Amino acid sequence: MEGAAYSLNHVEGCTHGCLYPCYAYLMKKRFGKFKDYKDWREPRVVENSLELLEKELGKLKGRIESVYMCFATDLFMYKQKEIIGLSLEIIKRLNKEGIKVVTISKGIYSSGLTDKKIFGADNEYGSTVVSLSEEFRKKYEPFSASVNDRIKSLKKLHDAGLKTWVIMEPYPTPNIIKQDISEILEKISFIDEVFFGRMNYSKLVTDYKGYKSFYNYNVLKVMDFCGKKGIKCHIKTGTLDKNQLNLDYLNYPPAFKKIADKLSA
């Protein structure tokens, strides 16, 4: 998977019930793990997760530098104490082995993660932020934590000297929500890294006239902003369309043309 060599998913399903649609849900349903959306929203904890982890650590000793949590669920699922508790135990165990943990969540991060005597100082904590609108969040991420609370919990980790990042994916087109990406970027300007990616698996996106130009322009905006702020920037594969970039080139401001030249090289 892009951005990680090893990943760990210790829960099946997710209470957040995101409606982008959610790739994890689509794949789990396709392969018969869940029968429907309601079933998906009733997560099942892998109860012997810590036992399985010990076996994996034994088999792969010395080969794992970092572990991504999670690709197919959410380790800090909002208001799910059992899942959060297990997640903290797993992070603690991996850190004890000297393995860095990289996380992504639409929940609230535990303040206990700032205790560097228990948890690794090199861990990287991330959240998904594709809009600041609570109306959008309630429609597409109906049972997750509010975006404002997510950003606040990231800021607390940042202020404690920990690395924080945001994934701006799946970023919606204007026919889904009209917004200025600059406002989102300013709100999260304290973070260390941004991942930006388009929305997939939705006809709403491809029905939007000029969606390729829209995503290209926002790629340039994100890269320009990150360059000025010293934030590491990663553009998700498939978000940028180089052919459209060349067609729109003359319409870009000078700063964006410089970035476009590097992208086209």
Image (cartoon, helix red, strand yellow):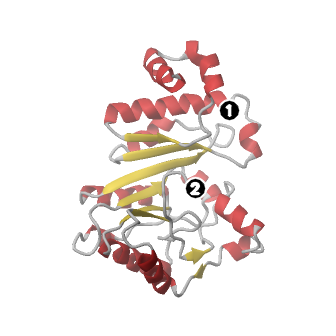
Instruction: Say whether residue 132 is visible.
Output: no
Q: Say what amino acid the circle numbered 1 marks.
A: Tyr
**First-in-chain label (2 vs 1):** 2
Which sits in the foreground, 178 or 170?
170
Say which quarter of the image contains residue 126: bottom left
Q: Is residue 186 left or right of residue 107?
A: left
Instruction: Say whether residue 228 is visible.
Output: yes
Name the residue: 50% across, 51% down.
129
Which sits in the foreground, 99 or 102?
99
Q: Is residue 194 left or right of residue 20?
A: left
Q: Residues within 10 Å of mark 1 (few under 14, many from 20)?
A: some
Q: Secondary structure at mark 2?
A: helix
Q: Can you give x and y, in whole percent of width and height, for residue 19 in the image? A: 67, 58
Name the residue: 78% across, 74% down.
35
87 to 23, vertically: above or below: below
Q: Residues within 10 Å of mark 2 (few under 14, many from 20)?
A: many
Say which quarter of the image contains residue 95: bottom left
- Residue that label 1 marks: 211
Q: Can you give x and y, in whole percent of width and height, for residue 24 in the image? A: 65, 63
- Residue that label 2 marks: 137
